[in-house]
Image (spheres, rainbow, N blue to C red):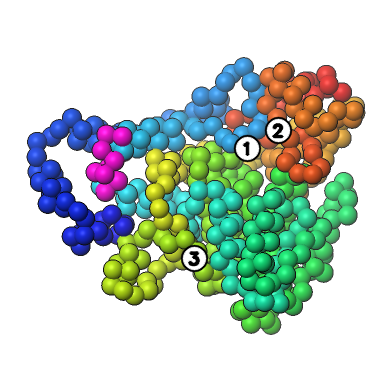
Amino acid sequence: MRRRQFIARTGLAVGAGAVAGLAGSACTPERRATRAATASTAATPTTQRLDNWDAVRAQFDLDPRRLHFAAFVLASHPRPVREAIDAHRRGLDADADRYLGQNESRLEAAVLAAATGYLGVRPGELALTDSTTMGLGLLYGGLRVRPGQELLATEHDFYSTHEALRLAAARTGASFRKVPLYHDLRSVTADEIVGRVRRAVGPRTRALAVTWVHSSTGLKLPVRAVADALAELNRDRDPADRTLLCVDAVHALGVEPDALPDLGCDFLVAGCHKWLFGPRGTGIVWGRPEAWPAVAPTIPPFDGRSFGAWIQGRAPRNLPPGAAMTPGGYHSFEHRWALGKAFGFHERIGKDRVAERTWGLARQLKEGLRAVGRVRLVTPLADELSAGVVCFDVDGLSAPEVRGRLLADGVVASVTPYAVQHVRLGTSIVTSPAEVDQALRSIAALA
C-alpha cells in the first residue's frame, strides 16, 4: 500500500467526502483525459520488431547529422520509454491527484517486476533511486561502520564514490584509504588486479568500493574474481567484520549481461540513464539479502507499511530492505514509471545481443585507433578488460581540443572528468560499424 492509499483508506485525507462525491459524478473532460492517458500507457507499442540493428536505431529520435558516441553521459530515450513518459505526463497534467492515487502502486510494482526480471534478483532486494550518486550516498551514508574500521576504495573511482566514502568516514570515525589496482594500464591483467585487492584488504577493512567499468580509462574489472578473493579473506570473519564488496556499475548496466547474484558482490549501484537508455533521473541499489543488514536507511520511504507504523506510533517491522532504502518524497513520477520500458526494451533485443554488439563495435574502434599515427589507445584491447567505453589521446592536442574538433566534424565525443583527461567514445546499440569507421577517419584527420 502506497502512502496516498494509506491516508485515503484511513480517513486521514482532508476533504475525503468531496473526493468520494467526485468519483460518482459525471465523466468530466479532465477524467476523460486521465482515462485516456492511462489507456495510452497500457497500449504503449511494444511489438516493433527489433531483430536487426537498423530497427533498433529507428527507435531513437537522434539527430542524423551527428555520430552519437556519448550516450554514456546522458542517453536518448527509445520510443517505448518516450511514449510511456508522455502517457504518464498527460495523466498527471490532466488530474495529478487522481492519476497518482489510481496508478502509483501498480506502476511502481511493474517497474520492480521488469527490473528484477532483467537483473535476476528479487523485488525486496532492490531500491529505486534517482541516480548513481544518490545510490552511492544512500549506501555509504547508511553503512554500519565502527570507529577504527576502514573504508577502502581504488584510485580509479569517480568523485561520487570517493566523496561519499569520505563523508561516511567523517561521520563514523572510520578511516578512508585509496589504492591503485595496477602499475601500468598497458600491461594490466586480471591477476594483477585481484592480487592488489588481496594485498590491500586488511582485517579492519569493512567495505571495498570498486567501479565495474572505469569512466576514466574504459578498464573493466573482473568483479567475479575480486569477489572470490574477498570470499576467501572473509571466510573466518564475523558478519560485522566482513569486507563488503560494493560496485558502481553505471557503465556496465545495459551492457554486461550477467545476472547480479552471479557477480558475487554484496551491493551494486547504478543509474539507468546511460547504457540502459532508461529515463533520465532513475537508478537502482541492489544488495544481497545477507548484506542488507549492514546498511541503515537514511531517507524515510513513502511505503504504506512505514506510514502505517508511524500512524500507530511504532517503528516499521518486516519492511523489505529495498523498500526501506527507496527514498520517499515526490519524484519525477512519469520518468520512474517508464523505467520498466527500458528494461523491457533490452530484454526484447536480447541481453547477449546487446553485449556482443557493444563489445564488437568497441573492438573495431580500439583496433582502428591503434592503427592511427599519433593516437595512443588508453583502454585495454582485451575484451575481458573493457566494455563500451574507449579512451584515447592524440599527440599534440588536449582532450578538450580533440573533442571540439571532432564535434565540428559531427562526431559526439566526451572528455574524462578526472585530473588526467582523455577523449572518450562509447559504442552502443545506437552506433554502427559504418559510424565507427567514419569516426576513425575523423580522428585520423586530426592526427
- Circle on res. 73: 1
* Mark 2 lies on residue: 414
Q: Nearer the viewer, mark 3 or mark 1?
A: 3
Mark 3 residue element: loop
The image position of residue 134, as x and y in percent, is 55, 53
State the mark number for residue 297.
Answer: 3
Q: Which residues are magenta?
A: 93-101
Q: Position of residue 167 (x, y in %)?
A: 65, 62
The residue sitting at 76% across, 58% down in the picture is: 154
Q: Choose between 277 and 129: the one closer to the eye.
A: 129
Determine the CA span between mark 2 and mark 1.
8 Å
Q: Which quadrant of the figure has residue 231? A: bottom right
Amino acid type of disc 1? Answer: Val
**Magenta span contains residue 331:** no
Establish if 153 lies above or below 15: below
Whether label 2 touches label 1, CB < 8 Å: yes
Q: Is residue 95 magenta?
A: yes
* Residue 1: numbered disc: none
Label 2 secondary element: strand
Please indicate whether residue 113 sits to the left or right of residue 140 in the image.
left
Q: Quadrant of the N terminus?
A: bottom left
Question: Which residue type does callout 2 highlight?
Answer: Ser
Which is the main secondary structure of the residues drawn in magenta?
Answer: helix
User: Which numbered disc, 3 or 1, marks the residue that appears first in the sequence?
Assistant: 1
What is the CA distance from the residue labelled 3 to the residue labelled 1?
28 Å
